[in-house]
Amino acid sequence: MKKIVAFGASSSKKSINKDFATFVASQVKDVDILVLDLNDFEMPIYSIDYENDNGIPKKAFNFKEKLKSANGIVISFAEHNGVYTAAFKNIFDWISRIEKIVWYNKPMFLLSTSDGSRGAQTVLEIAYKRISRGNPHEIPIFSLPNFYDNFDNQKGIIDKELNDSFTKSLKVFISNLG
């Protein structure tokens, strides 16, 4: 059975991005889903000095191994001041030191959501530009604005137009999974 790793790129204990990534992964039929919590991978802030003195933390290798074992990756980005959260950026920095191909060229689905009207689009654009480089798959993206108005834990995406757009992106991800 195929496996999807999903996570919200946030350290919030009540992360709507983690909830959203989990929901999206659950829309793919006949897969095992592993939902990661970035709090389980908290490490020292990346610096070359720390790496030279102490090496790469075991938690970075653990995170990277979870990615390697997956057939696909779903990430929903939270936006802090227009960019990645510090928690995600730090993990990204550490895992990029292990191997050059950070995401193993896996099929990916990049998402974002917030309680605002732009749905964290800025960080999604930044993430897409960085993460899509060199990935052989078309990486679909989707931003959900006004999370609390447009999402229900039982029904999913409530707004028809948004749901139609989401469904198109989801189909691309599923097609990439093969």
Image (cartoon, grey):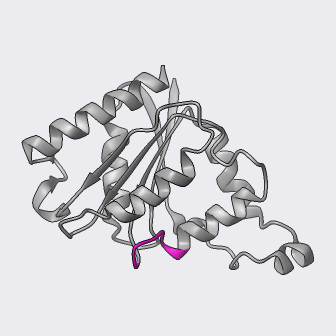
Q: Could you tell me which residue is drawn at 32 percent across and 60 percent down?
A: 121
Give left or right: position of 165 versus 64.
left
Residue, far right: 53
Q: Quadrant of residue 53?
A: bottom right
Q: Is residue 74 magenta?
A: no
Region in magenta: 81-86
Q: Position of residue 30 (x, y in %)?
A: 40, 24
Picture layout, residue 85 above or below residue 122: below
Picture layout, residue 130 above or below residue 84: above
Q: Position of residue 155 (x, y in %)?
A: 13, 45
Q: Could you tell me which residue is drawn at 26 percent across and 62 percent down?
A: 119
Main secondary structure of the magenta stretch: loop
Picture layout, residue 49 above or below residue 69: below
| Camera-nearest residue between 59 and 105 | 105
Q: Position of residue 37 (x, y in %)?
A: 49, 61
| Camera-nearest residue between 69 and 98 | 98
Give left or right: position of 94 versus 125.
right
Q: Could you tell me which residue is drawn at 28 percent across and 53 percent down?
A: 143
Residue, far top: 178
Can residue 155 be seen in the rendering of this structure?
no
Q: Could you tell me which residue is drawn at 90 percent across and 74 percent down?
A: 52
- Count the marks: 0
Q: Is residue 84 magenta?
A: yes
Q: Position of residue 174 (x, y in %)?
A: 39, 27
Give left or right: position of 62 versus 177.
right
